[in-house]
Image (tube, rainbow, N blue to C red):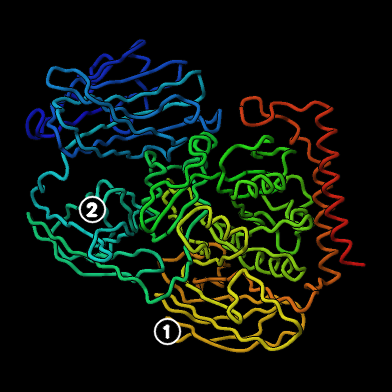
């Protein structure tokens, strides 16, 4: 292992001797235990690396004092490999895992401490981690500590190698030039998505940035870090900021030994917002492991979301993150953005839901893992009382097209919206992710089932989200996004818009639609059947192809695009209670990855948007469902009931998870089964009334 020091400490290019031939690197100290316990094989380079494993106490590997000056911007980097599997979220069980910085005065006394906690569960082999910081006033010394503090022995390890520290941005290295980029909105620096490409088409990114998609583009957690030291030559630079801003691209020349500082102004697209806000309610870090960016934080995710032009993010956190942020719905707030920590209720048997707006943990808890109780119905009722919202995430992710009933009845097919018809039959409105990171063909399957449910008279908001683990660098928040007609940037209003279905789902196109002034998600009341007037406007900076007006699940009108725009006013004959929605498509664009589309569809189009309906009620009679649709939902409920009685592992209990039931007695099983059956019967009775 090597520890590098920058030139202000021990001379330009100084490199302190790698590893002590016996046990530990020079200038570093072990605070407890035998030094040999901290040395592991399988180093990234060389023979050995630092290896920390929990032993029921605090393990700390510390540098000697480094001489630094106050007010300096420093960059710390290290290679890290994390492994662990029991418990699954092992880093959340430790008191602290990561790096601590101790700021020291001239006499060696501590004047401050700063830390970066590592939540990562498993990296993809060795990965680079970094942390930038500014030394506070009075700082004359710095100590770097790698710490693993665990109250118990758990199955994991943290390996560290190749640590380095430097002053940034520092001098330009010989033979290179410096490219300083800034994206601007209204002449002010802004977060954005950046692309830097050389003349051979190879992408580049700053040293202290978050590259995505194998370096194709990058984001920053600090605009001041947007500098690249590059070989002289021509480069193409580009910035984007989601669908509401035009992109900006320039060609620049990097000159050896010089700074080149192009600005990339981003202008808003010509569109009236009318109270619509775009956001993502399904964003994660770390749970699925394979991390590329192990030091990423929730704050970093919020800044990346700002760079994608989102107005809000409800981050799906780990249980401890939810508890630590209960009632805080103002994270990273500015004039255009607000964030909060919610929870994906990974209720494996009944279906996953994304939840937002928690102010307290309900008495019955929140269902996680494969448990028999509470059901999603209980979560919905709790969130209603708190003014929150819920969304069915990837409702048909593991469903075979044409085999919904069979798959819902298979107790081994988990994570799908098995409880959905019970929730609807019991009178709850809900939301439904039409776009989410799902299997190819998912959008088509979900659209057809969405239409079926609307044709039964249920009011369901249509939504979109990413379900991305941002640390894996496969994609960013807002790749799919939900627009809500909230009126103001407030999570109470945002949650209300979800509950009322004032939403549309999109991966780029922006849509405005109304029927006789009644907007998306609302209901128009008619005394009797007649023609109604409708108005549609859709826009995409990437161009559009077509919009389809959907009435009761059938295409009523097709409207061709005029470049980036679709504008149309038309009339719709309405003779009975109905619903009207809009589906918009656009051409292929490299900035979009349409995960839900089948390969043949991707060859034709990649842009997708779909609105929730405008509901139209004629007289006092609602939508009349078809008999075959009612029978389909009854069969779905019966399949869910059969799976409940067939699956045994929902009764296993979770003794290691404080927020879950540790075990179930026979009395518990009887009580829960009776409550489940009571809900099933109520739902069946409500549906059977349609057949009378």
Of all residues, the one furthest to the right in this rendering is 692
> Is label 1 in a helix, a strand or a loop?
loop
What residue appears at the point 31 percent right and 27 percent down from the top-left corner? 100
Q: Is residue 378 above or below residue 323?
A: below
What residue appears at the point 40 percent right and 49 percent down from the top-left corner? 302
Q: Residues within 10 Å of mark 1 (few under 14, many from 20)?
A: some
User: Which residue corresponds to mark 1?
Assistant: 563
Sequence-wise, the earlier of marks 2 and 1 is 2
What residue appears at the point 25 percent right and 58 percent down from the top-left corner? 189
Quadrant containing the N terminus is top left
Residue 467 shown left or right of residue 668 in the figure: left
Residue 165 location (% of width, % of height): 20, 34
Residue 585 location (% of width, % of height): 53, 76
Q: Is residue 152 or residue 13 the one in the foreground?
A: 152
Please identify the quarter of the rendering in which residue 618 is found: bottom right
Q: Cα distance, mark 2 to mark 1? A: 34 Å
User: Which residue corresponds to mark 2?
Assistant: 226
Q: Is residue 530 above or below residue 74?
A: below
Residue 338 shown left or right of residue 516 in the figure: left
Quadrant containing the C terminus is bottom right
Q: Is residue 256 or residue 62 the one in the foreground?
A: 62
């Amino acid at each position: 292992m090597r520890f590098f020091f920058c030139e202000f400490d021990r001379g330009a290019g100084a490199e302190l001797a790698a590893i002590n031939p016996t046990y530990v690197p020079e200038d570093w100290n072990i605070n407890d235990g035998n030094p040999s316990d901290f040395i592991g094989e399988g180093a990234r380079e060389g023979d050995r690396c630092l290896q920390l494993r929990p032993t029921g106490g605090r393990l700390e590997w510390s540098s000697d004092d480094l001489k630094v000056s106050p007010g300096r911007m420093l960059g710390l980097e290290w290679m890290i490999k994390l492994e662990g599997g029991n418990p699954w979220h092992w880093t959340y069980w430790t008191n602290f895992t990561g790096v601590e910085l101790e700021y020291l005065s001239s006499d060696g006394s501590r004047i401050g401490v700063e830390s970066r906690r590592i939540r990562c569960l498993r990296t993809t082999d060795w990965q680079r981690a970094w942390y930038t910081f500014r030394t506070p006033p009075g700082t004359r010394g710095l100590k770097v500590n790698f710490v693993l503090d665990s109250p118990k022995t758990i199955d994991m390890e943290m390996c560290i190698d190749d640590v380095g520290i430097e002053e940034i941005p520092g001098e330009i290295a010989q033979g290179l030039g410096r490219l300083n980029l800034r994206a601007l909105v209204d002449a002010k620096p802004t977060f954005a998505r950046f692309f830097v490409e050389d003349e051979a088409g190879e992408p580049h990114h700053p040293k202290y940035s978050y590259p995505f998609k194998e370096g194709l583009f990058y984001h920053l957690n600090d605009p001041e870090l947007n500098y690249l030291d590059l070989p002289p030559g021509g480069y193409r630079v580009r910035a984007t900021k989601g669908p509401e801003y035009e992109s900006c691209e320039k060609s620049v020349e990097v000159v050896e030994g010089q700074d080149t500082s192009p600005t990339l102004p981003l202008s808003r697209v010509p569109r009236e917002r009318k109270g619509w806000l775009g956001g993502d309610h399904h964003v994660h870090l770390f749970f699925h492991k394979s991390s590329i960016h192990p030091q990423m934080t929730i704050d970093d995710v919020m800044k990346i979301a700002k760079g994608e032009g989102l107005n809000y993010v409800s981050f799906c956190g780990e249980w401890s993150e939810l508890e630590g942020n209960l009632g805080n719905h103002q994270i990273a707030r500015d004039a255009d953005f607000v964030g909060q920590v919610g929870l994906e209720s990974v209720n494996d048997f009944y279906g996953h839901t994304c939840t937002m707006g928690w102010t307290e943990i309900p008495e019955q808890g929140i269902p996680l893992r494969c448990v028999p109780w509470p059901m999603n119905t209980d979560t919905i009722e709790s969130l209603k009382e708190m003014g929150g919202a819920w969304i069915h995430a990837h409702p048909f992710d593991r469903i075979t097209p044409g085999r919904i009933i069979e798959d819902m009845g298979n107790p081994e097919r988990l994570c799908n919206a098995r409880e959905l018809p019970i929730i609807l039959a019991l009178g709850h409105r809900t939301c439904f992710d039409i776009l989410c990171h799902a299997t190819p063909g998912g959008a088509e399957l979900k659209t057809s089932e969405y239409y079926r449910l609307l044709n039964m008279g249920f009011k369901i908001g249509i939504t979109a989200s990413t379900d991305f683990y941002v640390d894996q660098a496969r994609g960013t928040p807002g790749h799919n996004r939900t627009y809500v007609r909230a009126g103001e940037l407030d999570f109470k209003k945002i949650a209300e818009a979800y509950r009322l279905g004032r939403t549309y789902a999109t991966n780029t196109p922006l849509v405005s639609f109304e029927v006789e002034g009644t907007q998306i998600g609302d209901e128009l009341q008619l005394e009797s059947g007649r023609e109604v007037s409708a108005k549609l406007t859709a826009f995409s900076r990437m161009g559009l192809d077509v919009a389809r007006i959907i009435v009761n699940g059938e295409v009523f009108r097709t409207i061709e695009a005029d470049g980036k725009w679709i504008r149309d006013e038309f009339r719709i004959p309405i003779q009975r209670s109905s619903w009207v929605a809009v589906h918009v498509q656009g051409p292929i664009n490299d900035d979009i990855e349409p995960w839900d589309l089948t390969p043949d569809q991707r060859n034709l189009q990649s842009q997708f948007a779909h609105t929730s309906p405008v509901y139209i009620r004629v007289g006092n009679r609602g939508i009349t469902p078809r008999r075959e649709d009612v029978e389909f939902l009854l069969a779905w409920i019966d399949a869910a009931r059969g799976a409940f009685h067939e699956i045994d592992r929902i009764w296993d209990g979770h003794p290691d998870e404080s927020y879950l039931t540790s075990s179930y007695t026979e009395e518990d099983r009887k009580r829960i089964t009776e409550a489940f059956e009571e809900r099933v019967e109520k739902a069946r009775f409500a549906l059977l009334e349609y057949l009378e």
